[in-house]
Image: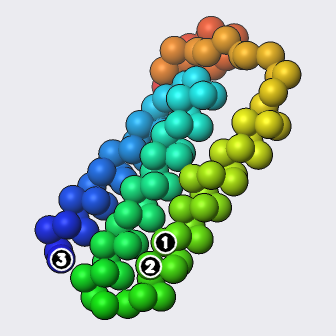
């Protein structure tokens, strides 16, 4: 149980770091869905290995809400908004390097 939960937690953390690093809106939304799915799988694994059916139900609700409903709402809200030009890491959106 510990190895499976540790591996899934590691992948969820890696996706979280990618989510912070990613600059495009669509990429962040896809990583949000991947992170939500990984956390739901982690909850299912812990619930199944511990024999807790309640955790499996929580994981299914979590998966439906965070991996299906919220991304659809966010995508609908983002429709029609112009894409902002991305700044390189360490730079503001105007292209001026911030003092260190």
Q: Do the residues labelled 1 and 3 touch (CB within 8 Å)?
A: no
Q: Which of 88 and 46 is in front in this view?
A: 46
**Residue 60: horizontal and vertical position, in percent?**
52, 70
Q: Position of residue 42 (x, y in %)?
A: 35, 67
User: Would residue 77 appear left or right of 9 to someone viewing this image?
Assistant: right
Which residue shows up at 53% across the image and 29% down it? 27
**Lower sequence index among marks 3 and 2:** 3
Where is residue 2 drawn, in percent x and y?
A: 17, 74
- With respect to residue 95, does 2 lie above or below? below
Q: Which residue is under mark 2?
A: 56
**Quick one: SS at disc 3?**
loop
For marks 1 and 3, the one nearer the N-term is 3
Instruction: Kindly identify which numbered label has been placed on residue 59.
Output: 1
Residue 2 is left or right of residue 44, and the answer is: left
Task: Give the CA distance from mark 1 to mark 2.
Answer: 5 Å
Q: Which residue is drawn at 44% across and 64% down?
A: 40
Q: Nearer the viewer, mark 3 or mark 2?
A: 2
How busy is the neighbourhood of tag 3: few (under 14 within 10 Å), some, or many (20 plus)? Answer: few
Q: Position of residue 47 (x, y in %)?
A: 35, 82
Q: Which residue, given by chain and number where applicable, does mark 3 sit on?
A: 1
Q: Are marks 1 and 2 in contact (CB under 8 Å)?
A: yes
Crowd band around label 1 with a 10 angstrom C-alpha radius: few (<14), some (14–19), many (20+): many
Q: Which of 94 and 46 is in front in this view?
A: 46
- The quarter of the picture where residue 28 lies is top right
Provide the secondary structure element on which disc 1 rests: helix
Q: Distance between the residues labelled 3 and 2?
A: 15 Å
Q: What element carries label 2?
A: helix
């Amino acid at each position: 149980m510990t190895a499976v939960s540790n591996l899934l937690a590691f992948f969820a953390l890696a996706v979280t770091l990618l989510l912070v690093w990613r600059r495009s809106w669509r990429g962040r939304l896809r990583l949000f869905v991947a992170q939500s799915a990984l956390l739901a799988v982690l909850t299912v694994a812990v619930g199944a290995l511990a024999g807790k059916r309640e955790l499996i139900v929580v994981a299914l609700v979590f998966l439906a809400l965070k991996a299906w409903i919220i991304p659809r709402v966010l995508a609908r809200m983002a429709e029609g908004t112009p894409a902002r030009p991305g700044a390189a890491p360490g730079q503001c959106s105007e292209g001026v390097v911030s003092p260190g």
